[in-house]
Amino acid sequence: MGKIMALGEMMMRFSPPGTETLKQHTSLETFYGGAEINVAVALSNLGTETEVITALPDNPVGDAALAYLRKEGVQTGAVQREGNRLGTYFVEKGTAERPSKITYDRAYSSFSRWSPQETISDSWFQDCQILHISGITLAISQEARETAYALAKKAKEHGVQISFDFNYRSKLWSIEQAREAFEYFLPMVDICFAGVKDLTNILNYNVSGDADGEEKAYRAFMQDYGITWLASSRRRPFTNLQHQLSGLLLHASGGRAEAPVYDVSVYDRIGGGDAFSAGILHQILESPEALKNMSEMITFAVAVGVLAHTVPGDAFCLPKEDVNAFLNSQQGSDIAR
């Protein structure tokens, strides 16, 4: 079936245990993450062949990060070893009344200063069907943005589909900077993950408040940029620890599917959107007749996202069997109507 590759920065996360704050902590738990890395790890756990393209420091910290990827079954042939810093970030997990808080420490990381345009290998795209990139990579640095552009162009030359998640982060850049970068990158995109706020706040689409208006804006966006698939996760928070999740999937041919609404007790929210994206990409690659199975595709992806909220760490680490078991258990009153 081929594989899915992901370009992005790998980071180390530090979290105080439980719901302690950094000021209170006496120890820190460590996890590995990064938006595209999370997608690759989730895909591997779902049974899809994956590989990451990134730069890790050439030191013991980089060795440990590489070992994590290999443990999760992610191929590392395109990982470059250079520089001396792995980006880090700190997550203080919230409570029902207090939201989680993230503090980044990623400046001058190996990935952010990596410029591999002259060394991009055609061999990277052998058997590759989809290349996944997010707006976070475009935001990290000029070098990372140019790397993403060059890699996407090379992938398109090999007939690879480009997957893109908006993943706008206001701590990394302004809306104006994001708009310029996205408008340049989006014409190469085949599969897109975006929400209504992305279209309105970043791309200036006019969206009315009802569901029909939202879908009309999505369709206009897909037509403007030649998007084949668009997936949007929907989240309704009641407290910081009690949410409802659903999702919408659209195809350029007019196909449409919407997932049921699931109640979620949030243990760790970080990476939930990446798990949803992985669920969609897994289904696009693995389903022989995707257009006929859009309802199953979006429901499966939302289920992956739901389960990602129930385990610690950034990346979805459960097997596909657990997703199917969860779906089978949700045929009754556990689905919010």
Image (cartoon, grey):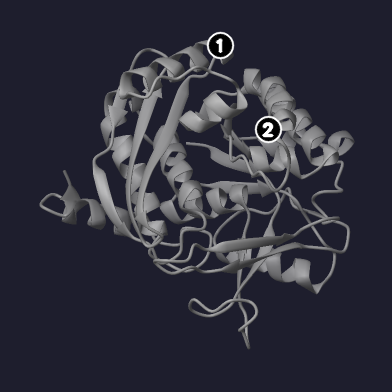
Q: Residue 5 carries which label?
A: none
Residue 185: where, in percent of width, then height?
69, 24
> Local crowd at mark 1 within 10 Å, few (<14), some, or many (≥20)?
few
Residue lying at 49% horizontally and 17% vertically, measured from the top left: 206
Is residue 125 positioned above or below 275 on the image?
A: above
Tell me if I can see residue 160 in this picture: no
Nearer the observer, 269 or 99: 99
> Local crowd at mark 2 within 10 Å, few (<14), some, or many (≥20)?
some
Is residue 133 positioned above or below 58 on the image?
A: above
**Which residue is at the far bottom?**
26
Residue 134: where, in percent of width, then height?
62, 39
Q: Which amino acid does label 2 sit on?
A: Ile
Is residue 84 positioned above or below 8 on the image?
A: below
Instruction: Report how many numbered discs are placed on residues in the image.
Output: 2
Tell me if I can see residue 31 in this picture: yes
Q: Distance between the residues labelled 1 and 2?
A: 20 Å
Residue lying at 46% horizontally and 52% vertically, measured from the top left: 272
**Quadrant (top left, top right, bottom left, bottom right) of the C terminus:** top left
Reading the image, the residue beneath label 2 is 175
Residue lying at 77% horizontally and 66% vertically, measured from the top left: 62
Q: Which amino acid does label 1 sit on?
A: Asp
Based on the displayed image, in which of its 4 quarters is residue 156 positioned? top right
Nearer the observer, 26 or 248: 26
Nearer to us: label 1 or label 2:
2
**Which residue is at the far left?**
332
Is 75 placed left or right of 42 in the picture? right
Q: Residue 224 carries which label?
A: 1
